């Protein structure tokens, strides 16, 4: 990162002080003060997608003394103005730039990192483009909308040595009550865990409404198939019952990915398969109740919606003595956001490194394919496809609307 | 029920309840393994595509053909590629139909469609990793429309055919946006060369990106690549 190699403002002033002949007022903010790093040592950030989750992410980063927040981007004027206003109020100036088009924000060479909280159908394009432009990225979950996107996001992060964190603060937060006994050895050898989550997203065919004057509808849709504006099609509320984009296939995998990113994240963390992918998804029908079994190469099983099992219910061998392992945690301070910023500084991989995040959300996507086809699937993690399964491989990706491509 | 769904498709438009088309999805599942039944279903969908139904109804048909379309669907879908309102959904099916004819139809469309739609086709050829389209993509690297050139570069990066690497290295992108795309495609091709054991060729690509004129993250990528060529990892 440039901030580690360029001289700080203090160092510059020490060596060049005699040459400065004109009066120059240096603010205490620029020089830094107690608990406030100098401007040259702060991570310069911008935000793309400042809706429900984006506002929370913005607040977390804006509140950090080691971040200088300089830009916001949203396709809705109202959201842009509100996001800019928040930044300006924080710094007591009007320096924050507001953009409609994320490409203009990513083209800025002064920005070190971005957070992305647009709808899911945008994540891969924006994360990959951010990496191409030398930015580190914090990307909300679910990080992908299709199976093909995940490996390409990981590839971009590794190619450019970018710090790319997925979202889900819940993985280390909400699930400690199952993580600790698993990692602590109390449950012995873990055999299986169940995740109850859903539903799948559906086709949207809502009627046309007038596009609000402050919204760039074409840019909201982006790579998704064209459809007329309808408030319920694009609303950012957290429902999946038909009144938000999370309900619909062109933008989201539904609750299966939205809450799946959390629950599968907690499950894969607890049973320690974050770094691998299943090799088979077994589709079962128990008297009309459909459920899945993900089988990992080490024999571990993750169930989805198994009848008679509770959410995050675990099967282990509690009578067996198993050595405890230290539980991985965030770096730095400030939860998942602080972990990301710390890793931006140290260049380590974050707790929710994009590869781990992709390994999580792909369980959702594999499950969606299995439910759509109503049958079992084999998965080849090395090739990132369904081996000898032309029908399933059609579901690896969806063609993107011009002019958008990965 | 299936007949009723196809009847509903004739007047289907935005605002209609999509559940009335569920029998078509059920038929897709039910006809698996039955070639004759699957062909009949495909033919019925194609018949709708050729009528004057709404854009929304054609959207539905293309979504189903994405799942069950074969070479038989290609001609009807190819006809839609030049149409602004229908090109994307034609690609929605063509991009995922594995038949060689689908890739050929996308390649054939390149000289016949406007630049915006061309970008879509280029993206689909990249997503298919269509090696046969490399010469056409290379030719478009110098297109007067920078967006087309950018799209061609990204598609070459997605395909990462060894013969693309030299063409990309010789490209002279003028805009920053095009430079970023060409650089990324070069690095992707270098990774492909390295994976194929062609370390010398990969090294030649990487060496082109370690100069001080390159952004820091690109120099970093090139340096990592060179270390990988030399058998050293981070």
Image: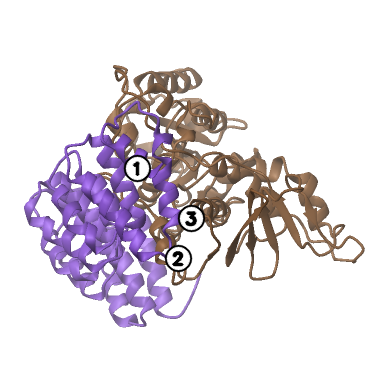
Chain colours: A brown, B purple
What residue is shown with label 1? B3
Sequence-wise, the earlier of marks 2 and 3 is: 3
Q: Are marks 3 and 1 on the same chain?
A: no
Whether A232 is drawn above or below B220: the answer is: above
Decide: few, some or many residues near mark 1? Use Cα within 10 Å; few <14, some 14-19, many ≥20.
few
What residue is shown with label 3? A373
Label 1, secondary structure: give it.
helix
- Could you tell me residue A348's position as x and y percent? 56, 56
Decide: few, some or many residues near mark 3? Use Cα within 10 Å; few <14, some 14-19, many ≥20.
many
Q: Chain of mark 1?
A: B
Q: CA distance from mark 3 to mark 1?
A: 22 Å
- Between B223 and B228, the one nearer to me in the picture: B228
Q: CA distance from mark 1 to mark 2?
A: 35 Å
Give residue A79's mark.
none
Which residue appears farthest toward the right when viewing the image? A319
What residue is shown with label 2? A385
Whether A241 is drawn above or below A355: the answer is: above
- Side of B231 relative to A221 (left or right): right
The residue that appears at 35% across and 26% down in the rendered structure is B15
The residue that appears at 13% across and 64% down in the rendered structure is B136
- Could you tell me residue A295's position as x and y percent? 64, 64
- Side of A279 relative to B95 (left or right): right
- Between A100 and A211, the one nearer to me in the picture: A211
- Between B120 and A349, the one nearer to me in the picture: B120
Asked whether residue B177 is in view, the answer is no
């Amino acid at each position: 990162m440039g901030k580690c190699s360029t001289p700080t403002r203090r160092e510059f002033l020490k060596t060049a002080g005699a040459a400065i002949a004109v009066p120059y007022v240096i603010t205490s903010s620029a020089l830094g003060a107690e608990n406030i790093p100098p401007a040259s040592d702060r991570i310069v950030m911008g935000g793309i997608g400042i809706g429900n989750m984006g506002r929370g992410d913005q607040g977390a980063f804006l509140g950090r003394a080691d971040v200088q927040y300089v830009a916001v981007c949203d396709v809705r004027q109202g959201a842009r103005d509100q996001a800019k206003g928040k930044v300006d109020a924080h710094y007591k100036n009007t320096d924050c730039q507001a953009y409609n088009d994320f490409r203009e924000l990513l083209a800025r060479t002064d920005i070190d990192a971005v957070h992305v909280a647009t709808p899911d159908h945008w994540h891969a394009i924006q994360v990959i483009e951010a990496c191409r432009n030398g930015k580190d990225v914090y990307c909300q979950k679910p990080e992908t909308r299709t199976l093909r996107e995940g490996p390409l996001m990981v590839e971009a992060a590794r190619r450019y040595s970018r710090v790319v964190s997925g979202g889900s603060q819940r993985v280390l937060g909400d699930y400690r009550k199952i993580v600790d006994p698993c990692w602590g050895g109390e449950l012995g050898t873990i055999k299986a865990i169940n995740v109850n989550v859903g539903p799948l997203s559906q086709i949207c065919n809502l009627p046309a409404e007038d596009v609000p004057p402050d919204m760039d509808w074409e840019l909201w849709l982006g790579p998704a198939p064209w459809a007329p504006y309808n408030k319920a099609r694009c609303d950012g509320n957290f429902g999946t019952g038909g009144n938000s984009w999370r309900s619909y296939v062109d933008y989201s995998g539904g609750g299966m990915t939205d809450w799946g990113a959390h629950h599968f994240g907690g499950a894969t963390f607890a049973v320690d398969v974050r770094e691998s992918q299943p090799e088979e998804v077994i589709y079962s029908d128990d008297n009309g109740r459909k459920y899945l079994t993900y089988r990992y190469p080490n024999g571990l099983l993750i169930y989805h919606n198994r009848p008679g099992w509770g959410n995050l219910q675990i099967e282990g061998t509690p009578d067996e003595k198993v050595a405890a392992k230290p539980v991985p945690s965030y770096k730095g301070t400030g939860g998942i956001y602080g972990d990301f910023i710390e890793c931006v500084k140290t260049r380590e991989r974050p707790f929710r490194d994009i590869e781990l995040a992709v390994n999580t959300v792909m369980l959702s996507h594999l499950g969606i394919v299995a439910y759509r086809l109503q049958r079992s699937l084999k998965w080849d993690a090395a090739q990132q496809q369904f081996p000898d399964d032309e029908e399933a491989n059609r579901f690896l990706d969806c063609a993107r609307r011009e002019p958008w491509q990965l | 029920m299936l007949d009723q769904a196809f009847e509903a498709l004739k007047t289907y438009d935005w605002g209609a309840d999509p559940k009335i088309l569920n029998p078509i999805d059920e038929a897709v599942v039910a006809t698996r393994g039955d070639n004759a039944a699957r062909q009949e279903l495909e033919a019925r969908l194609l018949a709708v595509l050729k009528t004057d139904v709404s854009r929304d109804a054609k959207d539905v048909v293309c979504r189903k053909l994405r799942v069950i379309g074969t070479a038989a669907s290609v001609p009807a879908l190819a006809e839609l590629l030049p149409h602004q309102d229908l090109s994307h959904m034609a690609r929605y099916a063509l991009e995922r139909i594995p038949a060689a004819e689908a890739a050929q139809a996308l390649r054939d469309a390149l000289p016949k469609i406007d630049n915006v739609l061309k970008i879509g086709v280029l993206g689909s050829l990249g997503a298919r990793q269509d090696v046969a389209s490399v010469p056409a993509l290379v030719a478009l690297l110098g297109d007067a429309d920078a967006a087309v050139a950018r799209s061609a570069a990204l598609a070459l990066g997605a395909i990462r055919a060894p013969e693309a690497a030299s063409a990309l290295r010789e490209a002279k992108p003028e805009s920053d946006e095009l430079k970023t795309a060409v650089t990324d495609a070069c690095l992707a091709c270098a990774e492909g060369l390295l994976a194929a054991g062609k370390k010398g060729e990969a090294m030649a690509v990487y060496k082109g990106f370690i100069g001080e004129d390159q952004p820091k993250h690109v120099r970093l990528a090139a340096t990592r690549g060179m270390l990988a060529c030399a058998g050293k990892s981070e």
